[in-house]
Image: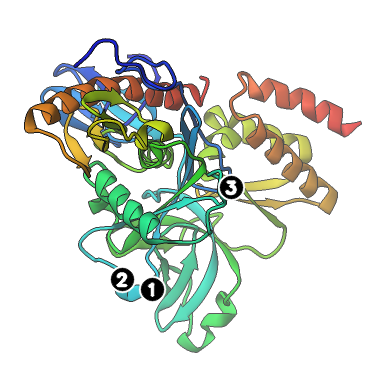
């Protein structure tokens, strides 16, 4: 890695954008949270556990976690057509898989926990912000969990590894181009989600994981602080 | 051990001196929180009290619900919980003819009942104790079930204050439904206003004292 690599916004290669987190942002939901990486803002609302409807989708063995990711039409500079599309359906499913290992869903047979994630403003890393907000919202809803998850995107721009991509970096075209790797880890360092589209060597991937572990510690602290400070004793 | 806010996965205490209670689990000698809430210890038992989320039915809770349906041997009651609640015909303090069930409790009636069992099938209710049964008159207010302990207060201090100041009879269901019965509608509405005030200021220290002042102001 070359030391003199300059990121478009002047951040260091392992520097995350300014993070903010808040719980209890939606009074009508059973649990809710907001999480942002700089200009990327996600809000998550949790409803339930409640009876699964229709009845034929009930699972008597364990509960169901149902996620719904959506980018609001004003979240990007060119108006996005509202409603589900191929990309949002995929991210919804990915979010479910990232969260399922920590949520103790077995305690709620025949029930469903709904997680609605909305992106208010997007500047890359939206799925990561969404997962972080969803983990906070689930905790805020009082659902039994093994821990929290924190998610971050690691990028490879040409040959340089950087943490927390922005849109400009995602569209990197110099050299080998950009590879975006969103990673979700539990608070004790286990991987629940890892996506990769692009080219990377196994040696570099190990480096990526190392960066993700470090970044996740910072994110976890922000999440922890948000939950602890939402009530004063 | 002092009271503190814990998040899922956080170690509350370590060592063999404590036992894991509700909302906690023992992992390699540590007591770990499984949910977000207030960690408390009593008689070596560590438990996490919920601060948010839906109502978790528990045995012994008095709840207020609405009759949803009548079956051949009881009533299905909606108590604002994902599990269905059932009031069996055998749990009525007197003999009821199967044809006359709708005269005792009809669909849409409100009822005060006690939970005597919570199982995987659902909640079982009883009205075989004093103070339980059909609600004939008065008003019902719904609040967040997590605010119920604040409305009751320490050893019932808050609820007794409200009863004393307004002369109303107030029954607080653990599921967040509150039945107010007074001599006049004005009294009942004053109780409703007081309860809403408590829920909006539920994190204030010394809320009972503040309520006393609030009542003095309202009475003028």
- The x, y position of residue A29, in whole percent, is 52, 48
From this viewpoint, which residue is outermost toward the bottom?
B99
In the rendered structure, which disc, 3 or 1, sits on the residue that comes first in sequence?
1
Q: Which residue is mark 3?
A: A74
- The x, y position of residue A56, in whole percent, is 31, 76
As helix, strand or loop, the secondary structure at mark 1 comes to: loop
Other residues around mark 1 within 10 Å, as few (<14) / some (14–19) / many (≥20):
few
Q: Are the residues tagged 2 and 1 within 8 Å (C-beta)?
A: yes
Q: Residue at x 8, y 27 (%)?
A: A203
Q: Which residue is mark 2?
A: A57
Q: Residue at x 65, y 29 (%)?
A: B201
As helix, strand or loop, the secondary structure at mark 2 comes to: helix
Alpha-carbon span between mark 3 and mark 2: 34 Å
Viewer-proximal residue among A71 and A8: A8
Q: Are callouts 3 and 1 both on one chain?
A: yes
Say which quadrant the C terminus of chain B sits in. top right
Other residues around mark 2 within 10 Å, as few (<14) / some (14–19) / many (≥20):
few
Left or right, residue A200 beside residue A50 = left
Numbered mark located on residue A54 in the image: 1
Q: Are callouts 2 and 1 both on one chain?
A: yes
Viewer-proximal residue among A211 and B161: A211
- The x, y position of residue A142, in whole percent, is 39, 40
From this viewpoint, which residue is outermost toward the left?
A202
Left or right, residue B141 beside residue B26 = right
Q: How is the image coloured?
A: rainbow
In the rendered structure, which disc, 3 or 2, sits on the residue that comes first in sequence?
2
As helix, strand or loop, the secondary structure at mark 3 comes to: loop
Q: Please name which of the two marks, 3 or 2, marks the residue nearer to the observer.
A: 3
- What chain is tagged by disc 2? A
Alpha-carbon span between mark 2 and mark 1: 6 Å
One can see residue B116 in this view:
no
From this viewpoint, which residue is outermost toward the right?
B220
């Amino acid at each position: 890695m070359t030391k003199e690599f300059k990121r478009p916004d002047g951040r260091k290669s392992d520097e995350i954008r300014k993070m903010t987190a808040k719980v209890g942002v939606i009074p009508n939901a059973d649990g809710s949270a907001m999480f942002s990486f700089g200009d990327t803002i996600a809000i998550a609302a949790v409803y339930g556990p409640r009876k699964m409807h229709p009845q034929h989708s009930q699972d008597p063995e364990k509960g169901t976690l149902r996620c719904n990711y959506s980018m609001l039409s004003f979240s990007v500079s060119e108006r996005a057509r509202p409603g589900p599309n191929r990309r949002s359906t995929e991210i919804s499913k990915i979010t479910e898989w990232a969260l399922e290992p920590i949520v103790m869903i077995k305690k709620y047979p025949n029930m469903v926990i709904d997680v609605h994630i909305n992106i208010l403003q997007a500047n890359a890393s939206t799925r990561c912000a969404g997962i972080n907000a969803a983990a906070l919202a689930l905790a805020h809803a009082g659902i039994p969990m093994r821990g929290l998850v924190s998610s971050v995107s690691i990028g490879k721009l040409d040959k340089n590894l950087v943490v927390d991509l922005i849109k400009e970096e995602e569209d990197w075209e110099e050299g080998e181009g950009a590879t975006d790797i969103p990673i979700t880890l539990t608070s004790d360092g286990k991987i629940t989600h890892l996506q990769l589209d692009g080219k990377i060597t196994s040696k570099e991937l190990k480096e990526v994981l190392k960066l993700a572990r470090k970044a996740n510690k910072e994110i976890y602290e922000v999440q922890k602080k948000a939950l602890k400070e939402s009530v004063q004793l | 051990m002092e009271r503190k806010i814990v998040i899922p996965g956080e170690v509350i205490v370590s060592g063999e001196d404590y036992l894991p209670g509700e909302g906690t689990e023992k992992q390699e000698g540590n007591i770990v929180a499984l949910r977000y809430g207030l960690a408390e210890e009593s008689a070596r038992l560590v438990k996490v009290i919920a601060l948010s989320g839906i109502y978790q039915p528990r045995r012994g809770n008095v709840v207020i619900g609405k009759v949803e349906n009548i079956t051949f041997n009881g009533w299905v009651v909606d108590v604002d919980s994902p599990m269905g609640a059932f009031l069996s015909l055998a749990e009525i303090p007197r003999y009821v003819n199967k044809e006359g069930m709708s005269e005792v409790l009809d669909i849409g009636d409100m009822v005060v009942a006690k939970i005597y069992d919570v199982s995987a099938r659902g909640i079982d209710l009883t009205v075989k104790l004093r103070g339980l049964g059909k609600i004939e008159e008065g008003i019902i207010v719904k609040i967040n079930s997590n605010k119920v302990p604040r409305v009751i207060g320490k050893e019932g201090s808050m609820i007794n204050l409200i009863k004393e100041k307004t002369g109303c009879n107030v029954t607080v269901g653990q599921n967040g439904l509150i039945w107010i019965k007074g001599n006049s509608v004005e009294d009942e509405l004053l109780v409703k206003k007081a309860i809403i005030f408590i829920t909006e200021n539920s994190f204030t220290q010394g809320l009972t004292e503040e309520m006393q002042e609030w009542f003095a102001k309202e009475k003028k």
